[in-house]
Amino acid sequence: MTTPVTARTVPSPAVRFSDGWEITVYYTAVERFHDGEPVPVTGCPSLVCTSGGRDLGEFPADFVNAVREEGTGLTVSGRYLNWSYDVGFWLDSAPRASDGGVLVPFVSAAADTDVLPAGTAFTIADCGRPEDVTPAVCARLRAAAWRISDEFTPGLGGARHIDAYIGPETGPGFTDSEWFTTLAGARLLLG
């Protein structure tokens, strides 16, 4: 009589755990949640442009600051005001990654390309220190299938730092909410 072979879960050799990551989040600022003094913004009226000095309109100062920090913002007109250190501001139909691709909530992530190259897939296996994140936010971040599709502004990344895109802010004071978090000592499952 032959003994049946039972299946075991064995990680693929291409899949590996990596410890000690700092994971921050980035988001799309939403103009209607900001009420700062209006400031003029100049840039490109579209993604592809040769002269970035065109008048793009006036927007609340705190919204413009958030766009500069996060890279993208949804205006009340329904267009996206995007910003990149090497391009400046431009108007667009979508929130954009550094390569011009569309940012996808709970999929797109940024890293220094010499640390994790574009296209690297990962999940968050452990959120790190429990005092850094609520259980609900940790669960949602862990459930996502992330992919490196964006990169940091030079000097802002680091050897074990990922920025995870979570989509549009959900209300005023978003940066004081549980979603604006940093995971310290997180564990990744790469591959």
Image (cartoon, rainbow, N blue to C red):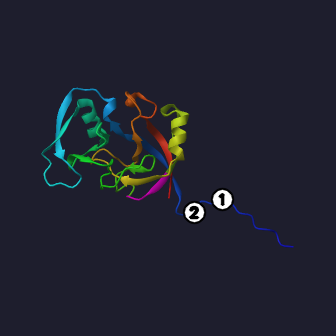
Q: Residue at x 44, y 50 (%)?
A: 107
The percent coordinates of residue 125 (x first, y second) are: 54, 47
The percent coordinates of residue 38 (x first, y second) are: 20, 29
The percent coordinates of residue 147 (x first, y second) are: 43, 54
Q: Residue at x 37, y 27 (%)?
A: 173
Calculate the distance from the C-alpha at mark 1 to the C-alpha at mark 2.
9 Å
Compared to 14, does 176 lie above or below? above
The percent coordinates of residue 43 (x first, y second) are: 17, 45
Q: Secondary structure at mark 2?
A: loop
What secondary structure is the magenta-colored segment mainly? Answer: loop
Q: Residue at x 25, y 26 (%)?
A: 36
The label shown at residue 12 is 2
Task: Please give left or right for residue 148 compared with residue 186 in the image.
Answer: left
Amino acid, disc 2: Ser
* Segment colored magenta: 118-122
Amino acid, disc 1: Thr
Instruction: Give the quadrant of residue 135.
Output: top right
For disc 2, the neighbor class at 10 Å (few under 14, some 14 to 19, many from 20) is few
Please give the residue where the numbered disc 1 appears in the rendered image.
9
